[in-house]
Image (tube, rainbow, N blue to C red):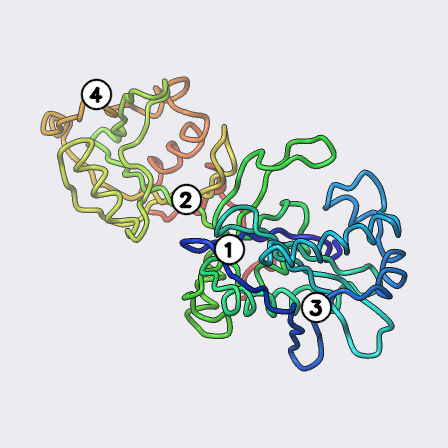
Amino acid sequence: MPEVRGKLFLARSGSVRGVTAVPPQPTLTDGELTLRPWRDEDIDLAYGLADDEMARWFDFPGTPTRANLAEGVERWRALYADDRAVVNFVIELPGQPGPVGNVEVRRISPGVGSVSWTTYKPYRGQRVARRAVRLLVVYAFGELGLERLQAEVDPENRSSARVAIRSGFRREGLLRGGAVLQGERRDVVVYGLRREDPAVDTLSGWTALMDSVLPKKRVIAHVVIRDTANRVLLCKVSYKKDLELPGGVVEPDEDPASGALREMQEELGTTLPLAGVLAIDWLPRWEGWGDAIEILYDGGQYDASFIESLNPDGFEILNVAWYSVEELQGLVSPLNARRLPLLLAEPGVLHNLSDGSPIKQRPGDLPG
């Protein structure tokens, strides 16, 4: 997708308004790419470069005309004179006859503004927007005195998302239905950058940036406890009809085994030694949940009377009981109906599962 548009929001405590004299709009450069004020002659050179992609992401009713651009330039100049309410720069490259795009800072309330960027079609794919935004970041943090930049990008506008990320903006969240585009209410991805964030070309800056955009899977830790008759301990829970294994979702910065032990203590008032891992299961998206990795631990084998030592919390866990393989169907989820018989039949084997079923090794998957 072309580098067409992204939005940034700029904020600091207090307002940049109240300056008695507005300095001339500067020219910024990285040694090759230049940001400068609009000139009258730029209008004829630039207006014909607008295309359907620009119209789509800026939510224009159609491709902008020369008159539209001329009105825009006059408006930007007037708003710059109004204490830099808007600062719109032409993007210029050596050897090109005119603008190759533009980038803009627009304050929308005291201390808060938005930025948008455009690369014209003939110049997309040349990292123009990324370099322009980086120059703008320096200007915003320096001359404008801003302390936070926030980007809002449509999830389908992948090229603008790349511009934000490669300019150092971390993905911070999703505003569901946060914008309207062509009459349709759409989600908006929020990216943020603080003045004190480590630079993206440092180890800590790069890893923090990547951590914000790479997938984050839930990790679930459950415990399989058996009795001497090879029945499995299952819990009647308050939030669904299916019986469930003890355990739950692993918390941030918690290792899975500790998560399993914590859940056992919280829900059943006991801490058991874990004998090892029985299965690793990948769970696809289901009923509003994203995909997840589940680790099923071997909680050991006990006399049937062991159940009397447990103390269900009465909130999530209402009671517990032993169940044989033959009793599982209809009492547990289809997922557990698939995998629990496998685990009970071969408790000494590490099961590699996908959605409760064994992952079958194909010829040639492993050497040897």
Judged by depth in the image, the label closer to the viewer, 1 or 4, is 1
Numbered disc in front, either 2 or 3 = 3
Q: Residue at x 51, y 74 (%)?
A: 201
Mark 1 → mark 2, Cα distance in angstroms = 45 Å
Q: What percent of the width, then of the height, locates residue 290?
A: 49, 38
Q: Residue at x 57, y 60 (%)?
A: 165
Label 4–label 3 contact, CB within 8 A:
no
Please give left or right for residue 353 compared with residue 89 in the image. Answer: left
Could you say which is closer to the camera, residue 61 or residue 293? 61
> Which label was assigned to residue 127?
3
Q: Please, what is the three-letter code of the amino acid marked with disc 2? A: Arg
* Rendered location of residue 338, percent (x, y): 45, 31
Residue 319 got which mark?
Answer: 4
Q: Nearer the viewer, residue 136 or 120?
A: 136
Secondary structure found at label 4: strand
Mark 2 and mark 1 in contact (Cβ < 8 Å)?
no
Please name whichever residue, 173 or 361, is drawn nearer the observer in this view of the structure.
173
Cα distance in 3D space between marks 4 and 3: 60 Å
State which tag comes first along the sequence, 1 or 2.
Answer: 1
Name the foreground residue: 363 vs 31: 31
Quadrant in which residue 363 is drawn: bottom right
For marks 4 and 3 on the same chain, the one whose residue lies earlier in the sequence? 3
Q: Determine contact: label 3, label 1, CB under 8 Å.
A: no
Q: Which amino acid does label 3 sit on?
A: Arg
Q: Which amino acid does label 4 sit on?
A: Asn
Q: Do the residues labelled 4 and 2 touch (CB within 8 Å)?
A: no
| Label whose residue precedes the other's in the sequence (1 or 4) | 1
Numbered mark located on residue 17 in the image: 1
Position of 229 with respect to 285 (left or right) is: left
